[in-house]
Image (cartoon, rainbow, N blue to C red):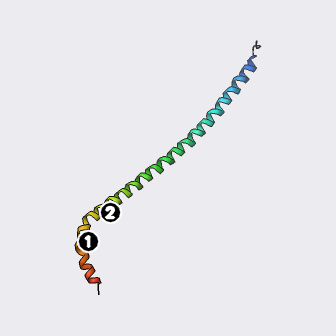
Amino acid sequence: MQAPLLPDDFQTQVLTELRNINTRLDKLETDIRETIKRVDKWELQFLQLSRDNLAISRTIIIAAGAAVIFAPLIKEIAPAVASLIKP
């Protein structure tokens, strides 16, 4: 069985444990801040990639639409252009 602690020993033990808890809480706070910074960075990258994908999608849709619209026109104009180019 452990001998009862004297008041000074008990106070020292409690203060030591409180310092240990404070140190661990400081480390946890630092870890959480770093994690939040990484998540913010990932979020910004995700948003930028989403914007880039939207721009690429618009470009593809516009190009496909232009091809559909201008294909018959080009088919009609091609002989005239070819006749101008031939000597």
- Residue 27, position in %: x, y? 63, 37
* Tag 2 secondary structure: helix
- Looking at the image, tell me whether mark 1 or mark 2 is earlier in sequence order: 2
The residue wearing badge 1 is: 74
Q: Nearer the viewer, residue 39 or 79?
A: 79
Mark 1 to mark 2: distance in Å? 15 Å
Which labelled disc corresponds to residue 38?
none
Q: How many marks?
A: 2
- Residue 9, position in %: x, y? 75, 20
Quadrant of the drawing holding the C terminus = bottom left
Horizontal side of 26 relative to 77 (left or right) equals right
Which labelled disc corresponds to residue 63?
2
Comparing labels 1 and 2, the label whose residue is closer to the camera: 1
* Dot 1 amino acid type: Ile
Q: Nearer the viewer, residue 69 or 51?
A: 69
- Residue 35, position in %: x, y? 55, 41
